[in-house]
């Protein structure tokens, strides 16, 4: 009877505790990759109120902190370009919202209106230590729509949201076969240039008061031309990469290159343009636009000083999503090295996405997004033991 | 003067050996590596001796080294058997067309391009023997072909013969579940799929009965029927069925059919194997699994798990693995074994699953799959632990000949990829048509 009463008292208490992010947590790691300075041996990360409180080697764990231990501790990993939440794991028409084929250019499509926070693949990434994802409209249309940044937690997009409009997604080269126009590369660029010129005119007419009607697509492109959002241009071949750089020079919008299979042919040009690259998945199948992809490109760009990040990308079949943790491992083994690969997976990705003030490293004041591993994070046989997002244990 | 004499005698001896046709190639010795023979424990500082395409000795540092051998110091490296892949689509081949759901007469062998860069890709991944199959968009898409990835000019140069008459060099590909379902002449449901397969095998049983009744009398033999002839080979256990199957109930249907007609089967993919591991074990059938980086992508793989290897091992099933290239990449086949270990499979069984287990499933375990005296000299020199992400295949040897060397830039490009390395024709795209 007494036990029963105790259980009855405890149940509501436990339920309540699930909603409390203010738990105080201490994470001990044999190696702690802070990504702000050298890795710390036998380090401790203190977490309070969802934020990182302190990080160091000789920290006395205060009373009342829940203690976790791991071989290796890293900041939560960042997937710099995905379609999870929009492209569901069933791969059936009802759960595929990453691409609208009714028109070649639809910059007004918002990612927040299509993101399913409960999608199985979001959880899949989270279970691999990925806590932040830049996701949204995928490749395939000339302008497919907008992207956003979310944490891999929450039951709704609002709970998950970090940034609602991050980039506008463009694709150069071959487009989805259901999009009838344009018919070739040069027509595509003519259409894109005309659309951007239309946006310039739209902005001028709005400024002069000549036109007060609102066009959602134009509004988005004006934001792009004003530098408020960036263009994410998926371009794999050298021809298409050069086209992206040429467009950027003509219209002077902020640009992030995506995919970039043949980037190794254009290292100087990309560097001169000061354009970061969200590199194709290291294990991308060498076919179609990506037929000339190399597992060494991440290393080549990194060594040239070009900012890079890893992506899971878009997959049309199986596996329905890739996992940046795995892509980083193979890049590490192909010239990048493990330290650099871990930086690219965390702080470099955060900088590229413009969210490094809050995530990407283990530093006091940042979000307590933390991944715990039972060995070298990049090794095939290592498992993720725990994941924390905003100080809450989510795995 | 004396040395001149011995030179003469030596030359004479060489001539005699050459003429007699018993000339032996110079033995190749690989010394100093950790050798993982798969059968038996790893050997530190081991010695591998190969000659005339065969392994002549495997052992520790005390192994006798032939006097005239070429000795390769491979200290710090790891040597293991060449990998065997039970299910791949390299080689640009094709199987049956859309005219029927079952094509037992169609041979993928007739369509293989031995110059395909996809073979270079597989060699770069350490694959030395492979079952190349037609797709899964049919109930029975055709005869598969077992290939050794020798440097080849013709497909015949690559064939692995299973019989003395050299008439059988592969299995037969079947599929159930959603891939072969479609508009007529394809089945519309799972039950119809099974009924069509049963009807075909009943016909084959009757054809075989006529042959048996003829007792070698040519006049009593049934008219030659290529479809029936291939299926008789299946019924006689000379040709193994490789059955693409994902969902737990489809796996059981594949088992049921094999039991009804008594043919040999390898269960391929078995995405939901973890749900029916005990049933697979009870049937005594082998299973070849695939590693995927996420579940989903098609309805039948919603519940696929990289824990299949561990679950099947625990149940006592013979577990193999495959690339299904281009679904997974031949260059990363060892990764599949490692990913299974990540999910609980034992290290030993995982390594067996990319070598000897697959060799058993293809009935070539007397020739490949382990490093043992008398077996084909198919082996890999690795830069480290086969299950580590940081390890590269440095060299791939087939029957004593080096077919891949990562230190050669012309070869390395097949491991990393790069500009114009893989020709478009080599790309396998039939999964977009519902092939796998």
Image: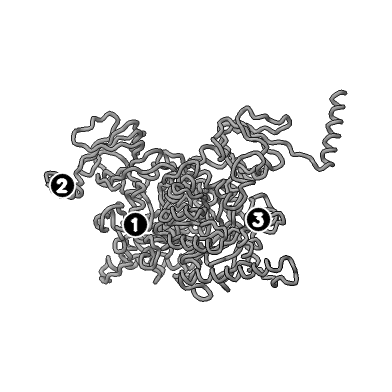
Tell me whether circle 3 and circle 2 mark residues in contact (CB < 8 Å): no
- A121 or A356, nearer to the observer: A121
Where disc 3 sits, the SS reads loop
Residue for badge 3? B115
Q: Nearer the viewer, residue B265 or B12?
A: B265
Left or right of A227, for residue A188: right
Classify residue A70 by image quadrant.
top left
Label 2 or label 1, whichever comes before in sequence order: 2
Q: Which residue is mark 1?
A: A120
Name the subunit of mark 1. A
How crowded pointer 3 is (Cα within 10 Å; few <14, some 14-19, many 20+) is rated as some
User: Neighbour class for label 2 at 10 Å: few (<14), some, many (≥20)?
Assistant: few
Q: Closer to the camera, B126 or B407?
A: B126
Mark 3 or 2: the one toward you: 2
- The image shows a total of numbered marks equal to 3
**A9, above or below A320, in the image:** above
- The residues tagged by marks 3 and 1 sit, at their Cα atoms, a distance apart of 42 Å
Q: Secondary structure at mark 1?
A: helix
Single out the residue that lies furthest toward the top.
B2
Tell me where residue B177 appears, x and y as whole percent.
47, 65
Is residue A106 something one can see in this rendering? yes
| Residue B216 figure quarter | bottom right
From the top left corner, tell me how far across and down residue A81 is, in percent: 38, 54
Q: Residue at the location (59% across, 55% down)?
A: B131
The picture quadrant where one finds residue B135 is bottom right
For disc 1, the neighbor class at 10 Å (few under 14, some 14 to 19, many from 20) is some
Residue B96's place in the image compared with A313, above or below, is: below
Q: Which mark is residue A7?
A: 2
Q: B126 or B134: nearer the eye?
A: B134
Q: Is residue B271 left or right of residue B354?
A: left
Using the numbered discs, state the Cα–Cα distance from disc 3 to disc 2 in whole angstroms.
71 Å
């Amino acid at each position: 009877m007494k036990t029963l009463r105790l259980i009855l008292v405890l149940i509501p208490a436990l339920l309540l505790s699930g909603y409390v992010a203010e738990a105080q947590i201490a994470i001990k790691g044999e190696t702690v990759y802070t990504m702000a300075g050298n890795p710390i041996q036998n380090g401790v990360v203190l977490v309070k109120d969802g934020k990182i409180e302190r990080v160091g080697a000789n920290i006395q764990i205060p009373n009342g902190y829940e203690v976790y231990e791991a071989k290796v501790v890293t900041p939560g990993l960042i997937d710099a370009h995905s379609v999870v939440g929009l492209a569901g794991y069933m791969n059936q028409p009802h759960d595929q919202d990453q691409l609208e084929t009714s028109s070649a250019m639809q910059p007004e499509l918002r990612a927040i209106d299509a993101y399913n926070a409960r999608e199985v693949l979001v959880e899949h990434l989270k279970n691999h230590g990925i806590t932040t994802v830049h996701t949204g409209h995928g490749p395939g249309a000339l302008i497919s729509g907008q992207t956003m940044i979310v944490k891999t937690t929450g039951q709704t997009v609002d709970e998950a949201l970090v940034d609602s409009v991050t980039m506008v997604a463009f694709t150069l080269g071959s487009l989805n076969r259901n999009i009838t126009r344009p018919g070739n590369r040069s027509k595509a660029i003519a259409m894109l240039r005309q659309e951007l010129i239309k946006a310039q005119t739209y902005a001028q007419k709005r400024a002069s008061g000549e036109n007060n009607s609102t066009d959602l697509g134009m509004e988005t492109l004006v934001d792009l031309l004003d530098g408020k959002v960036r263009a994410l241009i998926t371009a794999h071949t050298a021809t298409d990469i050069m086209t992206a750089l040429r467009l950027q020079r003509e219209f002077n919008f902020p640009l992030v290159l995506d995919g970039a299979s043949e980037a190794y042919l254009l290292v100087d040009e990309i560097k001169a343009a000061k354009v970061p690259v969200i590199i194709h998945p290291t294990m991308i199948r060498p076919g179609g636009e990506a037929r000339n992809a190399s597992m060494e490109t991440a290393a080549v760009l990194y060594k040239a000083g070009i900012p890079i990040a890893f992506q899971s990308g878009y997959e049309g079949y199986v596996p329905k999503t890739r996992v940046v943790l795995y892509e980083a491992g193979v890049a590490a083994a192909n010239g990048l090295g493990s330290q650099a690969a871990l930086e690219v997976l965390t702080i470099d990705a955060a900088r590229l996405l413009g969210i490094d003030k809050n995530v990407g490293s283990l530093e006091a004041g940042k979000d307590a997004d933390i991944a715990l591993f039972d060995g070298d994070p990049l090794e095939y046989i290592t498992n993720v033991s725990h994941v924390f997002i905003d100080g809450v244990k989510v795995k | 003067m004396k040395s001149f004499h011995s030179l003469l005698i030596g030359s004479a001896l060489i001539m005699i050996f050459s003429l007699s046709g018993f000339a032996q190639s110079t033995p190749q010795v690989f010394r100093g590596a950790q050798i993982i023979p798969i059968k038996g424990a790893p050997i530190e500082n081991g010695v591998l001796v190969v000659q005339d395409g065969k392994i002549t000795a495997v052992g520790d540092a005390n192994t006798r080294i032939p006097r005239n051998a070429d000795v390769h110091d491979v200290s710090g490296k790891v040597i293991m058997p060449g990998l065997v892949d039970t299910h791949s689509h390299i080689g640009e081949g094709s199987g049956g067309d859309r005219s029927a759901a079952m094509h037992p007469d169609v041979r993928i062998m007739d369509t293989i391009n031995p110059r395909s860069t996809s073979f270079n890709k597989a060699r770069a991944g350490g694959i030395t023997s492979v079952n190349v199959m037609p797709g899964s968009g049919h109930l029975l898409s055709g005869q598969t072909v077992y290939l050794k990835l020798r440097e080849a000019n013709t497909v015949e140069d690559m064939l692995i013969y299973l019989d003395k008459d050299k008439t059988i060099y592969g299995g037969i590909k079947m599929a159930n579940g959603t891939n072969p379902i479609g508009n007529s002449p394809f089945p519309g449901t799972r039950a119809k799929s099974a009924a069509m397969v049963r009807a075909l095998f009943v016909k084959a049983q009757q054809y075989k009965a006529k042959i048996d009744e003829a007792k070698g009398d040519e006049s009593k033999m049934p008219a030659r029927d290529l479809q029936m002839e291939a299926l008789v080979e299946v019924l006689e256990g000379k040709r193994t069925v490789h059955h693409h199957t994902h969902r737990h109930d489809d796996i059981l249907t594949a088992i049921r059919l094999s039991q009804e007609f008594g043919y040999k089967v390898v269960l391929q993919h078995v995405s939901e194997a973890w749900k029916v591991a005990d049933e697979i074990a009870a049937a005594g059938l082998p299973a070849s699994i695939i590693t995927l980086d996420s579940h989903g992508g098609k309805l039948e793989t919603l519940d696929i798990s990289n824990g299949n290897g561990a679950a099947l091992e625990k149940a006592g099933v013979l577990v193999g693995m495959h690339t299904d290239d281009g679904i997974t990449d031949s260059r990363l086949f060892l990764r599949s074994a490692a990913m299974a270990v990540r999910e609980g499979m034992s290290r030993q069984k995982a390594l067996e699953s990319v070598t000897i287990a697959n060799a058993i499933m293809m009935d070539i375990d007397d020739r490949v799959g382990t490093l043992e005296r008398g077996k084909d000299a198919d082996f890999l020199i690795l830069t480290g632990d086969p299950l580590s992400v940081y390890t590269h295949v440095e060299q791939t040897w087939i029957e004593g000949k080096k077919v891949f060397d990562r230190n050669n830039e012309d070869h390395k490009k097949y491991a990393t990829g790069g500009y114009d390395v893989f020709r478009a024709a080599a790309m396998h795209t039939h999964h977009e048509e519902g092939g796998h």
